[in-house]
Amino acid sequence: MESHEPLGVLLCDDLIFSSKITATARAHDLTVRVAWTVDALTTLLQQRPTAVILELDHSPFDIAAIMAQIQSLTSVPRVIAYGSHVDVERLKQARRSGCDVVLPRSQFVERLESELKE
């Protein structure tokens, strides 16, 4: 039987945090694949995910370029970005680039289950 469960993609280079996210997703019968690099994210975007989660603290990447790539997909996924609460400019940049939800890491952790369900 073919699986129709929603696919999420996570750009994250933190093994412990990515494990927490994928385990929470599995508990809700969701699949989240982890991209450790921007190149891996680009490859996973070809699977037409329903959601993309971006760790803004990941090694430097151009959020505007990533968002342009995501928005060029035929079915545009929901994009959630999270990062350090002290990096206000990076959070603002994610909002300006078109991310659907932008949260400091602590709020993302608090809302993880509800954000994954959406």
Image (spheres, grey):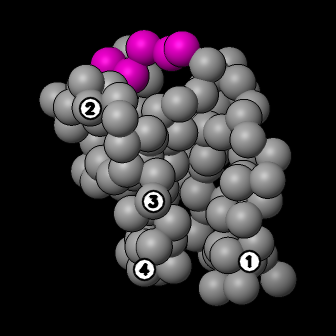
Q: Which residue is mark 1?
A: 26
Per the image, label 1 sits on a secondary structure element best described as: helix
The residue that appears at 70% across and 54% down in the rendered structure is 17
Query: Circle 4: is it few (<14), some (14-19), or many (20+) Cα within 10 Å?
Result: few
The answer to which image quadrant residue 73 occupies is: top left
Disc 2 or 1, which lies upstream in sequence? 1
- Tell me which segment is drawn in magenta: 60-64
Asked whether, in this view, residue 71 is left or right of residue 108, the answer is: left
Disc 3 or 1, which lies upstream in sequence? 1
* Percent position of residue 115, x then y: 42, 71
Disc 2 or 4, which lies upstream in sequence? 2
Q: Which residue is mark 4?
A: 114
- Can you tell which mark lies on residue 106? 3
Residue 101, visible in the rendered structure? yes
- The residue type indicated by label 4 comes to Ser
Q: Is residue 62 magenta?
A: yes
Q: Which residue is mark 2?
A: 88
